[in-house]
Image (cartoon, rainbow, N blue to C red):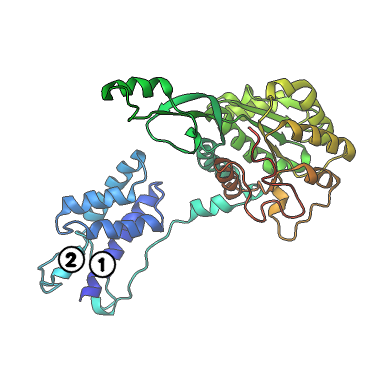
Amino acid sequence: MASDAVAGVTAGIGALAAGMRRRGARVGLGQLLLAHEALAAVDAADRADARAALRSALCSGRSELTLFDAAFDELLASGTRAVAPGSEANGGDPALALSLPGVAVPADEDGDPDLASPPLPAAWSDVERLRHADFADLGPEQMARLRELLGPLARRGALRPSRRTRAVRRRTALTTDRLDLRRTVRASLRYGGEPLERHWRDRRMRPRRLVFVLDVSGSMRPYAEGLVHYVQGFVTERPRVEAFVFGTRLTRVTRELSSRDPATALARAAEAVTDWSGGTRIGAALGQLNREHGRRLGRGAIVVILSDGWDRGDADELGRELARLHRSANRLVWLNPLKARAGYEPLTRGMQAALPHLDLFLAGNSVASLEQLGQLLELGLEAPPGALSPRGGRAGTRAGRA
């Protein structure tokens, strides 16, 4: 009969999770497994303890607390037979104390619980599917939910050591040969002038400047909206971020994307750009970036170009402007949504001219691919094996540049 109790717990937690999902909560397989562990850690016969344990395991945020309460109360009010320790259903077996109060053991059509098939935990994979979904395949409702996943990506960015230092007690890799002489001498007064207690200084870390250059030409129309939301998150969440879009000409949209409302930011950016969904001249746009905004960008920035590489302009001009931009940037990254397709080869003139000058060549067609860039930003953009394939780039060649 112990297996019946386990089946009852699984069925009860599954029904509770289903009730939460009907109300809009996101309960996945990980939360269901965690709920089993939480229920096993408390006295499940105590309804208050069981409720608190399940509440902490199944709720991912404050907004889901009310959804859990409603689903839990609905489950108790459904009138199902409870399996409680010491009752006739379990024969007083203490192992059945993990049964969820208010949830019946599943039974077959004849009412015999021993013949019931054990239920399986329900899995909530909608968010995981959305993470790996191609932006071109998303509808308006999915695109609205996509903004919630793109927002946290902006909190992951590259840092650089500042010239300013701060006092620390322990010596680290950044504090090598950086003795804080003033604090060390002051501390030596406690020991008759002997420098027994040493103090050190290390360099502060500052966010590295990020520059996004997004292609909004006609060939990038399926991906433009999702990538604009991605860039908008960085503009609003991090300092020292510049955003540009280009088709046949370059347009600075940092101010337009600074609005906290994604819909407003997208509308302002579309209004400011006169060549949205038009032609593509990548070389001319990057030349305008180098000439007109080079001082604003400064040296040592990470430049991220988001484009499929389809270019109607001069390929030689694109190569020259990328080489100039590569010399002033800390890293030059190209995100091409087409790279995620099976059998992709960079055969367009634009990509052929760009690959020799890139430090990273990645896909940018989904949330998962953008998360990969976020991980590399945190690690200083040292590319893993294959991040530059096919036939691209020079990762890690300038690791020492500030």
Residue 6 visible: yes
Which x, y percent locates residue 37? 28, 59
Quadrant that contains the C terminus? top right
Which x, y percent locates residue 388? 70, 51
Q: Residue at the location (49% across, 32% down)?
A: 177
Q: Secondary structure at mark 1?
A: helix
The image quadrant of residue 360 is top right
Is residue 360 shown left or right of residue 86? Answer: right
Q: Residue at the location (25% across, 67% down)?
A: 8
Q: Residue at the location (67% across, 56% down)?
A: 386
**Dots 2, 1 in contact, CB < 8 A:** yes
Which x, y percent locates residue 53? 24, 51
Image mark for residue 8: 1
Amino acid marked by disc 1:
Gly
Q: CA distance from mark 2 to mark 1?
A: 8 Å
Is residue 186 shown left or right of residue 177? Answer: left
Is residue 113 shown left or right of residue 177? Answer: left
Residue identifier under label 2 = 83
Quadrant that contains the N terminus? bottom left
Q: Considering only vertical position in the picture, is 230 above or below 166?
A: below
* Front in this rendered view, residue 354 or 278: 354
Q: Residue at the location (32% across, 26% down)?
A: 194
Circle nearer the N terminus (2, 1) = 1
Tell me if mark 2 has few (under 14), some (14-19) or many (20+) residues whose alpha carbon lies within 10 angstroms of its own: many
Which x, y percent locates residue 163? 55, 24
* Front in this rendered view, residue 310 or 326: 326
